[in-house]
C-alpha cells in the first residue's frame, strides 16, 4: 500500500499545536483564552489532537475500500476504554509538544489530562480486553470496527458509606460533551421487538410490534505512531417518534415524554454482570439492540461493495466477545434467509463461516440462558430460527447429547458454539478446561473448533503511558521500538546483572510509590510508609477472586505481629480496589469487611509501621494506571479453574511486580515465562479443587487444622470489626465454615506460607529488584499485539494492511 505522508501526519511542533488549541478555544468553545476554563482547555486540546487523528483514519478507510479487504467486526457489550486523550497524544507522538503548548497557554498539562472523565463502559477484564484489542488492531493495521453500546451511564460510581458499605451512584460521563465522538444520524437502523411471524412458503416475515432507532456514534481509535486508525462504533437508542404532541396538548406532560424515556432506557445503563433476575428483559433487548444494528451495518457495508452474498465470509469476520452478542448468528441467518432469499441451510453455513466466539467463563451460572418464553415474546422469529438450527445440528449429529434449547431455556453458550467456526478460550489452561468441561460434548462433535488465544494488554497504555519512568529506562537500555514489538523486552535481561541497572529499576519503583503515597494521603487522608511493600489486589469483587482470602490473611498477620512484634515482618501496605455488582450480596459483605478491618488495623499504633490497609473507592482504568506501576506484589489468588485468564496479572508483571498466585488462568503462563523461582505459587490446582470439594466437610477440616485461620474467623465473629456486633458478618463466616465453594479455607495455610516466603524475599531488596526486573523482561509476550496476531492468523484469516 502506498503510504503517502501528508502534511497532517508530519510531526507537529509545540507552536503549531498551541495555535491549533487556540483556534479550538475560539471557534469550537467560543471563548477567548483569558476566559477559557479547564474544561475549555481540555476540549480544545482534545479537538486539536482529534484533528490529527482524522487523516490517518480516512487514509485507513480509503485503503481498506481500495483493497476490498476483509474486515474484522468485534462485537462486545463492553468497551472499558477509560480516558482517551493521553493515549491519543502518546500514539500520535505529541506528548512533549502538547505539554509545552498547554503550559504556554497557562495550564498544567497533567491537570488538563485528569479533567477527562474515565469512560467506564464495562465491568472489568472482558471490557478492558476489548479496549486493548482496539488499540492493537489499529497498531497492527488490521481493518476493524468495534461495535457496542453508548451507555449514557457506564458502570456505577462507587463510594463508601460511613459504615464502610459500598454506595452506588450513576456515572455521568456524558454530562459533558464527549469530545472524541462523531454523531452519525445517517447511520441508523430501526430495531424491532415482539410482534408476530407470518410464514409464507419457504420464508417468514417478522412484524415487530415495538421498535427503537439505533443511532451510530463513531470514535476513531488511533494506533501506535498514527499509522492506522479504526472505528469504535457505539449505538445509542432513540425513540421512533420523539414526542407525543397529542398527549402534551391534553396536559399529560409525563405521558408525552414516556415513549422517549422508554426507548432511551435501552442504552441507559450498563448491567453489572453476575446479577441475575433484575431487568432480564431489558438486558436481552440491549443485547439484541446492539447486535442487530451491527449486523445490519455490516451487511450494508458489504452490499455496497459486493453482490454475491456467498462471498460474505471472505470479507467479513465477526467476533463475539462472550455470549452477549450470541444473537448475531440467528439475526444474520434471518437477514440472509428471510430478507435476502438465501436457502436456510446455506444461510446457517454462511453465517457460521463469518462468526467466531470467545468464551470467558467456565462458571455455568455466568453462561447466559434465556427463558424460552421471554425469547419467544421479545424475538419470536429468532426463537424459530434457533429451533431450526438446533434441528439441523441434531440431524447432522444424531448421537449428540446437547441441544441449544433445553428445559425451557435457550443456552447462549451452545448457540454461540454451534454458530461459530472457531471458539476460543483466553489462556492455555482455560482453553483446555473449555474442551474438558463446559463444551466437552460439542468439542467431541467438532474437534478442532476450540482454539486458544491467550489474552494480552496494550503496552502503549499499560507501560508507556502508565509508567513513563520505566519506559525511559527501557528505551535507554534496549533502544526505541519496543512499544510495538514488546517481546524485545527480553533484551533487558543481560542488563539485569548490572548493579547500575538494578539501582535505577529500584529507584523508579520507589519514585512511583512516592507518587502513590502522596495520592493516598491527598485522597484518603491516610499516610503510608513508601518504603513498605505495596501489596495490591485490584479487580472486580467476586468470591472466586477471593478478596476474603486476602483479608483473612491480613487479620491473621495483624494478630501475629501483635503477638511477636520483633519478628521478621516485611512492612506492608495492603491495597484493595474494586467494585461489587449491586445485587451481589456476598461480594458487598466482603467489601464491608475490608473497610472495617482497615479501620481497626489502621488505628492500632503498635502495628502501624508494619501493616496498613487502604481501599480507595471507585476502582477504574485511571486508578489501575496509577496503582500498578507503584506495586511490589500482585495478588492473583483466584480459586484454580475459575479465572479464565486475567489481564491485571499481566499488567503487574510487565511493570515489575512479583506475583503471589494460584495455578489459574494466565498465571500459569506468566509463571512459565518468568520462571518458578520468580513467582510465589500456592494453593490447590484446578483438579485438586474439584476433588476437595467432594469432601463434604472440607472447610471445617481446614479450619480445624489451621489455628491461624480459626482465630481470624473467630475474631470476625466476635464483633471485633463490627463494633462488638456478632451478627454483622455471620453470613460471610457461616458461608466459609459450611460449604466454602471457592475453597478459601482449604487454601489458607498454603497462602499464608507463600506470604511468608514473600516476606523473606523482601528482606533482600537487591534480589527482589532482580526478580522484579526479570518479570518485566520476560513478559513481553503478553502484549495484546501478539494476541491479535493470533486471532488474525487462526480465526479471522486476515492479513495486516501495514
Ligand atoms: C485490567 C483491568 C481489569 C481486569 O483485572 P483482572 O485482575 O484480570 O480481573 C479490570 N478492571 C480494570 C479497570 C482493569 O484495568
Image (spheres, rainbow, N blue to C red):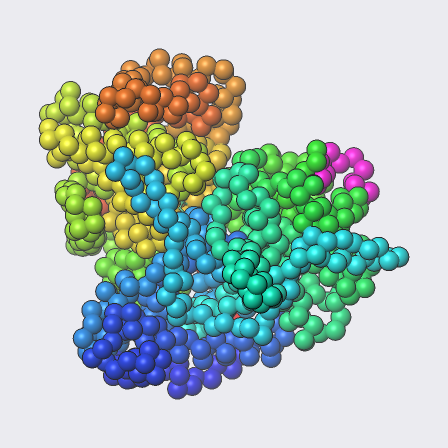
Give the percent coordinates (x, y) of residue 312.
Answer: 70, 65
Where 246 sits versus 522, above or below? below
Left or right placement of residue 426 versus residue 513 in this view: right
Q: Residue at x 25, y 38 (%)?
A: 162
Q: In this rendered view, identify the residue nearer to me: 152 or 497.
A: 152
Where 338 sits versus 18, above or below? above
The residue stretch that appears in magenta: 393-406
Left or right placement of residue 611 versus residue 350 in this view: left
Where 84 sits versus 535, above or below? below
Q: How many marks?
A: 0
Farthest-out residue, front: 250
Q: Is residue 394 magenta?
A: yes
Quadrant of the rendered structure where residue 210 is? bottom right
Give the percent coordinates (x, y) of residue 629.
Answer: 27, 51
Q: In this rendered view, identify the residue nearer to me: 720 or 229.
A: 720
Q: Residue at x 43, y 40 (%)?
A: 582
Give the percent coordinates (x, y) of residue 534.
Answer: 23, 42
Farthest-out residue, bottom: 7
Left or right placement of residue 214 versus residue 659 in this view: right
Amino acid at each position: 500500500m502506498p503510504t503517502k505522508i501528508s502534511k497532517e501526519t508530519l510531526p507537529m511542533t509545540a507552536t503549531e499545536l498551541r495555535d491549533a488549541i487556540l483556534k479550538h478555544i475560539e471557534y469550537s468553545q467560543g471563548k477567548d483564552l483569558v476566559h477559557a476554563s479547564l474544561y475549555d482547555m481540555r476540549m480544545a486540546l482534545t479537538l486539536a489532537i482529534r484533528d490529527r487523528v482524522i487523516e490517518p483514519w480516512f487514509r485507513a478507510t480509503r485503503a481498506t475500500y481500495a483493497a476490498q479487504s476483509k474486515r474484522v467486526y468485534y462485537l462486545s457489550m463492553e468497551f472499558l476504554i477509560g480516558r482517551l486523550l493521553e493515549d491519543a497524544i502518546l500514539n500520535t507522538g505529541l506528548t512533549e509538544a502538547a505539554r509545552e503548548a498547554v503550559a504556554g497557554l497557562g495550564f498544567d498539562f497533567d491537570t488538563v489530562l485528569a479533567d477527562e472523565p474515565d469512560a467506564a463502559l464495562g465491568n472489568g477484564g472482558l471490557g478492558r480486553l476489548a479496549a486493548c484489542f482496539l488499540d492493537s488492531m489499529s497498531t497492527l493495521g488490521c481493518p476493524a470496527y468495534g461495535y457496542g453500546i453508548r451507555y449514557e451511564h457506564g458502570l456505577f460510581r462507587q463510594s463508601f458509606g460511613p459504615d464502610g458499605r459500598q454506595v452506588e451512584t450513576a456515572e455521568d460521563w456524558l454530562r459533558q460533551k464527549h469530545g472524541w465522538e462523531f454523531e452519525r444520524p445517517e447511520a441508523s437502523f430501526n430495531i424491532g421487538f415482539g410482534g408476530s411471524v407470518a410464514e409464507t412458503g419457504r420464508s417468514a416475515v417478522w412484524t415487530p410490534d415495538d421498535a427503537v432507532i439505533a443511532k451510530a456514534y463513531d470514535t476513531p481509535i488511533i494506533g501506535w505512531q498514527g499509522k492506522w486508525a479504526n472505528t469504535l462504533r457505539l449505538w445509542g437508542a432513540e425513540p421512533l417518534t420523539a414526542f407525543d404532541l397529542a398527549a402534551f396538548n391534553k396536559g399529560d406532560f409525563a405521558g408525552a415524554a414516556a415513549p422517549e424515556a422508554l426507548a432511551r432506557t435501552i442504552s441507559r445503563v450498563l448491567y453489572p454482570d453476575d446479577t441475575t433476575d433484575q431487568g432480564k428483559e431489558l438486558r436481552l433487548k440491549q443485547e439484541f439492540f446492539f447486535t442487530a444494528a451491527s449486523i445490519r451495518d455490516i451487511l450494508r457495508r458489504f452490499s455496497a461493495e459486493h453482490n454475491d452474498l456467498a462471498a460474505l465470509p471472505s470479507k467479513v469476520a465477526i467476533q463475539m466477545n462472550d455470549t452477549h452478542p450470541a444473537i448475531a448468528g440467528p439475526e444474520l441467518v434471518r437477514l440472509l434467509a428471510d430478507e435476502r432469499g438465501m436457502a436456510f441451510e446455506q444461510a446457517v453455513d454462511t453465517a457460521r463461516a463469518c462468526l467466531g466466539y470467545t468464551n470467558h467463563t467456565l462458571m455455568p451460572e455466568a453462561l447466559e440462558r434465556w427463558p424460552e418464553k421471554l425469547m419467544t415474546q421479545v424475538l419470536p422469529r429468532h426463537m424459530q430460527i434457533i429451533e431450526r438450527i438446533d434441528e439441523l445440528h441434531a440431524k447432522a449429529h444424531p448421537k449428540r447429547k446437547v441441544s441449544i434449547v433445553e428445559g425451557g431455556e435457550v443456552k447462549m453458550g451452545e448457540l454461540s458454539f454451534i454458530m461459530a467456526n472457531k471458539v476460543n478460550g483466553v489462556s492455555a489452561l482455560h482453553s483446555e478446561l473449555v474442551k474438558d468441561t463446559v463444551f466437552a460434548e460439542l468439542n467431541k462433535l467438532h474437534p478442532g473448533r476450540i482454539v486458544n488465544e491467550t489474552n494480552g494488554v496494550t503496552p502503549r497504555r499499560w507501560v508507556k503511558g502508565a509508567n513513563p519512568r520505566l519506559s525511559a529506562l527501557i528505551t535507554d537500555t534496549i533502544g526505541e521500538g519496543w512499544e510495538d514489538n514488546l517481546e524485545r523486552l527480553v533484551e533487558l535481561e543481560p542488563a539485569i546483572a548490572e548493579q547500575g541497572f538494578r539501582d535505577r529499576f529500584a529507584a523508579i519503583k520507589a519514585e512511583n510509590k512516592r507518587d502513590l503515597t502522596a495520592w493516598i494521603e491527598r485522597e484518603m487522608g491516610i499516610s503510608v510508609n513508601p518504603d513498605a511493600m505495596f501489596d495490591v489486589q485490584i479487580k472486580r469483587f467476586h468470591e472466586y477472586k477471593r478478596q476474603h482470602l486476602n483479608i483473612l490473611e491480613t487479620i491473621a498477620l495483624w494478630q501475629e505481629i501483635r503477638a511477636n512484634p520483633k519478628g521478621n515482618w516485611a512492612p506492608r501496605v495492603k491495597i484493595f480496589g474494586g467494585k461489587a455488582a449491586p445485587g451481589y450480596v456476598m461480594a458487598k459483605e466482603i467489601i464491608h469487611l475490608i473497610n472495617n478491618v482497615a479501620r481497626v488495623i489502621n488505628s492500632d499504633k503498635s502495628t502501624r509501621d508494619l501493616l496498613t490497609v487502604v481501599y480507595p473507592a471507585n476502582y477504574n482504568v485511571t486508578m489501575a494506571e496509577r496503582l500498578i506501576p507503584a506495586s511490589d506484589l500482585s495478588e492473583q489468588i483466584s480459586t484454580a479453574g475459575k479465572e479464565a485468564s486475567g489481564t491485571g496479572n499481566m499488567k503487574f508483571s510487565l511493570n515489575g511486580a512479583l506475583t503471589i498466585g494460584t495455578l489459574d488462568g494466565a498465571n500459569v503462563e506468566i509463571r512459565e515465562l518468568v520462571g518458578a523461582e520468580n513467582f510465589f505459587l500456592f494453593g490447590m490446582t484446578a483438579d485438586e479443587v474439584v476433588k476437595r470439594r467432594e469432601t463434604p466437610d472440607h472447610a471445617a477440616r481446614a479450619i480445624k487444622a489451621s489455628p491461624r485461620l480459626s482465630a481470624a474467623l473467630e475474631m470476625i465473629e466476635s464483633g471485633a470489626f463490627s463494633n462488638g456486633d456478632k451478627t454483622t458478618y455471620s453470613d460471610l463466616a457461616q458461608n466459609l465454615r459450611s460449604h466454602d465453594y471457592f475453597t478459601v479455607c482449604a487454601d489458607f495455610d498454603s497462602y499464608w506460607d507463600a506470604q511468608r516466603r514473600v516476606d523473606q524475599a523482601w528482606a533482600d531488596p537487591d534480589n527482589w529488584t532482580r526478580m522484579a526486573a526479570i518479570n518485566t523482561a520476560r513478559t513481553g509476550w503478553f502484549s495484546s499485539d501478539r494476541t491479535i496476531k493470533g486471532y488474525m492468523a487462526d480465526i479471522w484469516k486476515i492479513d495486516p494492511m501495514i
